Amino acid sequence: MSAAPLTTAPLTTAVLRASETGADRSLTRRLLRNPLGLTAIVLLGLIVLLSVLAPWIAPHDPNHVDLAVAFDPPSATHWLGADSAGRDVLSRLLTGGRLTLLGAAIGLTVAVVVGLVSGLVAGYYGGWFDTLSDLSTSLVMALPNMMILLAIRVVVGPSLWITMAVFGLLISPSIYRLVRSGVRQVRGELYVDAARVSGLSDARIIARHVLFVVRAPIIIQAAIIGGIAIAIQSGLEFLGLGDQTVPTWGVMLSEGFGNLYIAPLLILWPGLAIALTIGSLVLFGNALRDALEDKPAAPRLRGGVARQSTATATATATADDDVALSVRGLTVGYPTTSDALKTVIESVTFDVRRGEILGLVGESGSGKTQTAWSVLGLLPRGAVVESGAIVHDGVDLLADAGRTQRGLLGRRIAYVPQEPMSNLDPYFTVGHQLVAPMRKHLGLGRAEARDRATQLLAHVGIPDPVRTMKAYPHEISGGMAQRVLIAGAVSCDPDLIVADEPTTALDVTVQAEILDLLRSLQAERGLSMVLVTHNFGVVADLCDSVVVLRGGQVVEQGPAAALLSAPQHPYTRDLLAATLDGTAPRSVSDAAYAELEAAR
Amino acid sequence: MTDTLPSVENSHTVENLLTVENLVVEFPGRRRRAPFRALKGVSLDIAPGETLGLVGESGSGKTTLGRAILGLAPVTSGSITFEGRPLVGLGRAQRRAAGRDVQAVFQDPYTSLNPAMSIEDILTEPLTVQGVAGRDARARVRELLDAVGLPADAGARRPNEFSGGQRQRVAIARALALRPRLIVCDEPVSALDLSTQARVLDLFIDIQRRTGVAYLFVSHDLMVVRHISHRIAVLYRGEIVELGSGEQVTDAPEHPYTQRLLAASPVSDPHEQRLRREQRWAQAARAS
Amino acid sequence: MWSFIARRLAGGILLLVVASSLTYLLMNANSGGIALRILGDQATAEQIAAKEAELGLDRPVLERFGEWALGAVRGDLGTSWFTSEGVWHTVFSRLPVTLSLVVGTVVVTTIVATALGVLAATRRGRVDRVVQVLSVVGAAAPNFWIGLMLVVGFALTLRWFPATGFVSPAVSAAGWAASITLPIVALALGSVAAVTQQVRSAFIEVEGRDYVRTLRSRGLGERTVLFGHVLRGAATPALTVLALQFVGLLGGAVVVERVFALPGLGETIANATTSGDVPLVMGVVVVSVALVVVVNLVIDILAGWINPKARVS
Amino acid sequence: MQRHIRGTAGAAAVLLAGAAALSGCAATGGAVEKDDWSSLTIAAVAEPTSFDPAQAAEANFAQYYQPVFDTLIRRLPDGELAPMLATDWRLSDDGLTATLDLRDDVTFSDGTAFDAEVAELNLERFRDSGGPFAANLANLTDVVVVDDDTIRLELSTPDPDIFQYLGNSAGYMASPAQFTGDAVDTQPIGSGPYELDRRQTVTGSVYTYVKRADYWDQDARWDFFETLAIKPMLDPAARMNALRSGEVDTGIIEPKSIPEAEAAGLGVSTFQVNWYGLAIFDRDGTMVPALADVRVRRAISYAIQTDAILDAVELGHGETTDQGFNTDSEAYLPGLDEAYTYDPDRARKLMAQAGYADGFEVTMPSSSNMDPAMLAAVGQDLAAIGIRVTWREVAPADFIPALREGKFALSWMSFAQPPTAWGTVSRFLLPTSAWNVFKTRDDRIEAAARTALANLDDPEVYDAAVAEINRVTVQDAWNAIFYRVEQGVVTRAGLAAEGQAGQAAPSIYNYSVDSGAPEDNAPESNAPENNSTDSNSTDG
């Protein structure tokens, strides 16, 4: 029993989000492949089966009293012994399971029906019903529910069924909230919009699209609620508030407590049954959640820069003074469910000269971002650098399990991310996020660092740097945020900047300004820069040289002007051809339309 | 203000498919704050078989306009008429019936298809609403898949088995299922890779040629809009600042904002890009 | 900020009004037998009638509720029917017990669950599995069962802690700590199980966010990133769960109070509802709901402090 | 797979470890020695509702009042009456006048002196305040103050138990200053050996009494403690744990906990207080017509296997019987203990003779304060002779009210056996009795009662009359009584407790500190005494 019987941990939004994308068939498969999930399902199935079949498989009449064998230990006739009235414990355990589960099922049904219907209506339509149900939900959640259960019991009597139904009502907010937030989230999904545009009625949309998404989370929540229902039952019965005439596991447990020192085993069996059932429900919920979040069943490898082979690295590491960054034969892989690594970039090799801006260009999946993260040593957990070398200023960054690399981060090598809004910590002021690295790397005092940060902000073109220092990320615009991130990147005077699609999330007019800013910073500080982008316009605007990636491999590299004007590799040519630059406008190219226009 | 726009008069010579007049859309403000006015009196029209490009930056209201036409955003005032019938102020069911000739293709091909449904289910969904089912529906699905260049066996698979470009083709097929007269395309290629984007744009053009459907094509990318639109409207902070032929708007923009937009769009030729940059700086210098 | 507090307090008062009216009506739906219960089994019919008149049971429910409410507004919660003691006095003599338990459990839960959750999220592997097992065990074992085992093991056999009773901290701080240790352990196991899971998944989710990568790219130490930034981001959902735990424990502590014979609010309300002691039940409900309102307010303010976006001007 | 095995195995291991600890614990962890007996802590099974003596309840509640309030007459453990505030007492031959000589050297803890007028005030107030036992003085027409230290009680009808009452709640003497103050419910002021220390008292948790230095009876034959603490502990398991861990020094336990207490090295004494059995309320067949037939009621008595129930439920701590009169009362007839022995065939025959060969339906209350095994056994035994029981669960607190309100024709019940015969007669058997729920009348009983009251001065006739009442009720099977159960009083080593006749919890005068080994056989003697209410059933 959870200590706080009527509380349930809200499911993470990740689950809701995940449940949308999880196709049901593969979900079931994933669930069954998880040994925990499989065990839980088998156990639950077994418990339910045994309970349902109780009347037929129980060796004795569960209510047959034989005082002569009271408290008898397990024997050939009574496998689990006899209770205080000489009734067969095994038979009572089976029958008790039937009643316990039935009680829990009643609570669960009420909770799901009430929570689901109100959650669907409130979430989909909003309006007064939403306000009202939200209000009553917070009311129910604010009341110590155990008290309500006790009071209800006084009024309606100690019926297990009514108690469980009321319990269902009291716990329905947890389903309601889940459904409501799921529905609200789905309601904003484009496929629901598409369905509405297709002319589907609300009922159909709810049935087809919305219910599906909340289904799995509801099952998880239901598993938790089922466990709580059983725990609540036994808790009330322990308090002597149960229905003696309905021999649930809790009643058996309560009887066992009364005879604790005469026959300690009497609390073991129902206790074990309760613990096993709740435990399997929790396990089942956990496994389903894991399956939804699609966590690999195999243990994750501790990721990072565990380079497996350094042979190529030392061989080809260049000592050229003019080269700021040299990437040699870099190969990175991710673990898969089978033991093999899935390679995402393979033998990537390029140099960045001092003061040069190198563009890493490619379509999605080309490995350009993975390459950038490798240079930074910020590959996601699990990623493995299989081979290759990254040499910065003559130093092999991967030599000592990445320690050198981490030491240079922020100070010598800096990062400008793609999405400005999600790359600032929403919980700290802009100022704090700028000042902390400067104090650490440059050893500045608080005031000094603040001054410098304010100056930097002014320098990157922020109109009111003092105010911006005090602002939280959500209080500034995306363009401003990107300027702040750039200011952060250059704050500790790095010599190499890795910028991952720094303008992709911005409007074109803002993009142009940010590109200007990067250009001027580069010029004034003599920075070297790796610029990841998919946009040839950005390359043309900023880059000195270009590396074109496809499927994790370099297809072509060279000076920007040459490569853009005379691409050698067919893939590069195709890509450049796909840009719409220089094509005729449709109003001209569409002959029929042009005629029509002319006719007007 | 619509009267000042050069092309409005022209379009009256043809029977309009869709007419939007003085459309205002407001979203209620949070916590007693004043409502946010996303569209401040927008007027435009679309002729049958025509593509009207709608270009603007984030917050310009371009997506809101598309959603208002689809009945997905609340209309505060103004009118939307489709083939002479009003689309505003109807009940839910009436709106559904009136709007069946206006379909949509959305931006994100990853979220605009229900991941749990097979492609066939996704494509039959609009058909069943119209009472087409069984063999007819399956035949229509094959037809649609063919029209968007997907293999016939795609129907049995699920969206996550397809690439972004292929998913967008499915979305287009779904929009075509009901043989609409107008498709609102909300940034349909901006999430796609460069090469895919070009192919999908060509598909749009191809379909328009074959079926005569009209598009309201919403995008932030002037080049994309120029490539597909007969006429282009430039939206800025909830108002249309310029509306003209694709050629006029993208080659000789009149409004300073459009000029700024054009100068800011980078091109892949380094030389030409340097010229644009300088042009932009000159504009900025003039402005300040 | 003040207007926010005022609004929440107004909501709290509404909650109090609704909760107390509902409880009053509920308690009065079955007021038969109360006089007999008070007077004992030897009472005669006349005595019972007199007692019922004395308690006002012969008058309409609404009239009695109005009287009660008027008194409550003036701060007079009346006198218990069964102990003749002022309701305020009873509630406040028992509040320290339940508050010790609930606050203690919440504090222990916060510390242990945060430590375990962060450990599980950052270490994964074996630690993660241990935490998972713990969460299943914590959820599966009924807390009265755990309580009983603790009594047998630590109170009766090892004699490290008392088996029953509550020592007021005013009397002896050490005695107080000893008297609530086992009950808190019994309660905390379930809470820790629930909250650890929450902290773990919130931590993993936040650690995967973009800004964490950026913070790392700034060369900030791993400790600063994890504890200064990730934990803060994970705190908001954890706070919500803690608030829920608090509410649940307020009533749910009754089972453990029974095992350890602690004179807490849970035990009080369990006895008062079953015996039909309307004034006492009302008093406990009013005080509990007020507590919940205050706790939720504190949690909201805390959440605002942690998360500036949730802050209200 | 490995991961899951560890998960479930872990859970199972915890469970098993707990069970192992439990089964081992009965043998380990003996009682803690106590050297300093300046304080005594008692675990009680009830909580007082008021400290107003006029509202006082009896039986288990007596322990809360006795430290503060002296009674006019003291009841010794064996039930004999002894002087307390009254030095002498006598009843007139017609039983209508009781005269008491009072002490003149007693002061209340507030300094007020105790005298005849104070006694009069207390008695009249008790009669008029509508407290739980006010009915005991209902026939008190007048209290006459004869002089400063003598009062005369005038009764409208004779009452053989009048002095018993004055040794119980009716005899509590409180300072008259209390009657005008508003703290009468919470701050008792009496002449007793202790005062209630409100600061160290937490209602519902602990009631602390401190010794009065100037108590009038410094030669009292009982042991004083510097402080006396009474902790209400309603849960039997918690009570047992507190006893075992030494947090309380003494308390009463259920018979089935006796082996555990003994194993833990605690002293256990037992005495008989209650009878357990089926109370047949509807003897006139108002609700269940079959019960009007004496053959059916007898059949019920024959149907229950009382010996087996006694062994299983009380581990044999008790004596089977069929009569409701205390073994020490004037009406006790040893032969009636075996009036009905388990004989289902005979029961079925009787049912058939009464025309109920196919049995009948009856609804009985079940409650968590009934032993589950008892409930099951009774249900099955009744079913064996065709009486089909529908159990209706009743909350413990509603159990007594439901029975008193006549909602059930038949119920399992646990009743105290008052130490005097008249206690049983007046509580259960007369049309005016509170527990004669359906007001059954029987001419033989009423006639015998009249005879008894008319012969208060002639013990022989009186005893025969009340014995006749006993015989009639057993013959007519007014109830189906199973057995008298033995109450266990547990004490830590060094403390002795004597059971109080007819009262579930020992009076506070009955505890004594003993330098030697714990006492292991306490008196089972009972004497004419006041009626008392049983602990288990009435107070849940």
Image (tube, coloured by chain):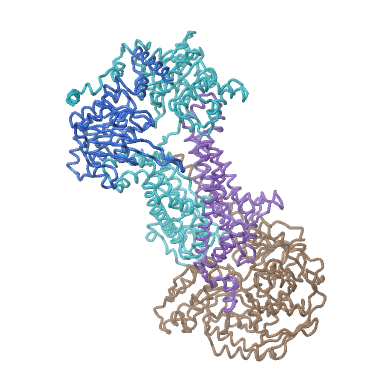
In the figure, A193 relative to B6: above or below? Answer: below
In the figure, D95 relative to C185: above or below? Answer: below
Q: Is residue A266 visible?
A: no
**A131 or D209, nearer to the observer:** A131
Q: Residue at x 54, y 32 (%)?
A: A428
Q: Quadrant of residue D514?
A: bottom right
**D537 or D493, nearer to the observer:** D537
Horizontal placement of A118 versus D438: left or right?
left
Q: Quadrant of residue D257?
A: bottom right
In the figure, A35 relative to A57: above or below? Answer: above
Residue C244 rendering spot, x and y as whole percentages: 52, 48
Residue D39 rendering spot, x and y as whole percentages: 75, 61
**B224 or A278, nearer to the observer:** B224
Note the chain letter of the cyan one: A
Q: Colour of chain B?
A: blue
- Total tally of numbered discs in the picture: 0
Note the chain letter of the purple one: C
Q: Is residue B185 visible?
A: yes
Image quarter in which the N terminus of chain C is found: top right
Horizontal placement of B171 versus A449: left or right?
left
Note the chain letter of the brown one: D
Horizontal placement of A443 versus A13: left or right?
right
Horizontal placement of A183 versus D429: left or right?
left
Residue C231 rendering spot, x and y as whole percentages: 54, 35
**A252 or A120, nearer to the observer:** A120
Residue A301 rendering spot, x and y as whole percentages: 46, 29
